[in-house]
């Protein structure tokens, strides 16, 4: 059983973080229209998480997916956080992500990487989305929200709890596969070194993009390829900076990133290439990567994602990008296939 073989309509999925009111307060009708646009465009893989707006993204996604047959799409969500009924008035802080979802629901969010917490999280997600099953489950943010080496203790907690629980669920047929859902490569490398659990894939956000891919290329992706662990790329636009936005790593982009993007755009413009197309197709050129899941909160951006995936990009563009040093010399490109 592979992730790729369970994606009903190709590698382009939809990341629902924006539906949790990431960065702004999104009206319900706009969120619904965005999911509907994704379906109309042919998207059949949807990724959610309890963390996204304290359950808001899952609720909104579930409402729209209820209009379709469950067998017609693939669905993933995440574990590692529990959404409580308790309401908080202050903005909740989450490590590197800060107050990213301050416009989401006000339910208190707590960490729980235990086996019991994993089962509870999945049960809660099923109820919020109104579905009878989840295909893939990612263990969320085992490193990002913790200082220094503290993530190693959290990783071990997840190892003896969530990982073993999900391994059993996969073997029993409750889910089709599991892995991590992170934006750091260290925990994924640690996961691949474990011998007592067998992950099927990992959702890696922001660490294999046009702007940031060198570290992943060195060890992580070769190891994943050897072990047959498939990679789903989240955040292919690096929080939006590669799609006309101003954010990088969930904050305003620093000058050096703005400068690098400008150089990529200049080459793209010379060859008539939309930068979004370059961003998506770059990710999918690596053989370990089976899906890419950009997020969106407006219907027209969904159309742009599908157009980007299907845009014909001249070989000269990829050669110019490599020769400029803006991509690593050993990064696979579409022209290498």
Image: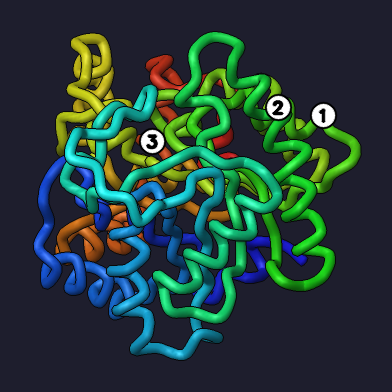
Distance Cα–Cα, label 1 vs label 3: 39 Å
Q: Is residue 243 left or right of residue 184?
A: left
Q: Position of residue 55 (x, y in %)?
A: 35, 57
Do callouts 3 and 2 mark residues in contact (Cβ within 8 Å)?
Answer: no
Secondary element type, mark 3: helix
Secondary element type, mark 2: helix
Q: Name the front one of labels 1 and 3.
A: 1
Q: Which residue corresponds to the image point at 30% horizontal and 74% vertical from the top-left?
A: 41
Can residue 170 be seen from the camera position used here?
yes
Q: Earlier in the sequence, mark 1 or mark 3?
A: 1
- Residue that mark 2 sits on: 189
Q: Is residue 3 left or right of residue 33?
A: right
User: Is 214 or 265 nearer to us in this picture?
Assistant: 214
Do callouts 2 and 1 mark residues in contact (Cβ within 8 Å)?
Answer: yes
Local packing at callout 2 (Cα closer than 10 Å; few below 14, some 14-19, many 20+) is some
Q: Earlier in the sequence, mark 3 or mark 2?
A: 2
Q: Is residue 324 left or right of residue 91?
A: right
Q: Which residue corresponds to the image point at 28% horizontal and 69% vertical from the top-left?
A: 60
Q: Is residue 140 above or below residue 218?
A: below
Can residue 274 be seen from the camera position used here?
no
The label shown at residue 316 is: 3
Local packing at callout 1 (Cα closer than 10 Å; few below 14, some 14-19, many 20+) is few
Q: Quadrant of residue 212?
A: top left
The label shown at residue 193 is: 1
């Amino acid at each position: 059983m592979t992730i790729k073989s369970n994606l009903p309509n190709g590698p382009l999925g939809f990341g629902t973080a924006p539906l949790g009111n990431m960065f702004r307060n999104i009206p319900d009708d706009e969120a619904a229209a965005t999911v509907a646009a994704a379906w109309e465009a042919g998207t059949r893989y949807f990724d959610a998480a309890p963390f996204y707006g304290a359950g808001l993204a899952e609720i909104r996604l579930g409402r729209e997916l209820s209009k379709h047959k469950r067998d017609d799409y693939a669905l993933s969500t995440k574990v590692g956080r529990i959404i409580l009924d308790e309401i908080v008035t202050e903005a909740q802080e989450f490590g590197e992500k800060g107050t990213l979802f301050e416009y989401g629901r006000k339910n208190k969010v707590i960490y729980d990487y235990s086996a019991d917490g994993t089962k509870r999280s999945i049960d809660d997600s099923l109820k919020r989305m109104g579905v009878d099953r989840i295909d893939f489950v990612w263990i969320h943010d085992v490193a990002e929200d913790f200082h220094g080496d503290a993530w190693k203790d959290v990783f071990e907690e997840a190892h003896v709890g969530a990982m073993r629980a999900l391994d059993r669920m996969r073997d029993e047929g409750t889910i089709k596969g599991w892995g991590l859902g992170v934006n750091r490569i260290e925990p994924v490398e640690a996961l691949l070194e474990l011998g007592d659990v067998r992950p099927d894939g990992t959702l890696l956000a922001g660490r294999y993009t046009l702007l940031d891919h060198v570290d992943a290329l060195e060890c992580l992706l070769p190891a994943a390829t050897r072990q047959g662990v498939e990679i789903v790329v989240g955040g292919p636009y690096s929080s939006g900076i590669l799609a006309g936005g101003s954010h990088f790593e969930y904050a305003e982009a620093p000058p050096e990133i703005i400068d690098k993007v400008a150089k990529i755009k200049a080459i793209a413009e010379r060859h008539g290439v939309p930068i979004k197309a370059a961003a998506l197709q770059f990710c999918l050129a690596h053989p370990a990567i089976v899906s890419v899941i950009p997020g969106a909160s407006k219907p027209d951006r969904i159309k742009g994602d599908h157009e980007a995936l299907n845009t014909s990009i001249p070989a000269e563009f990829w050669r110019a990008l490599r020769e400029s040093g803006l991509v690593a010399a050993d990064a696979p490109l579409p022209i290498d296939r």
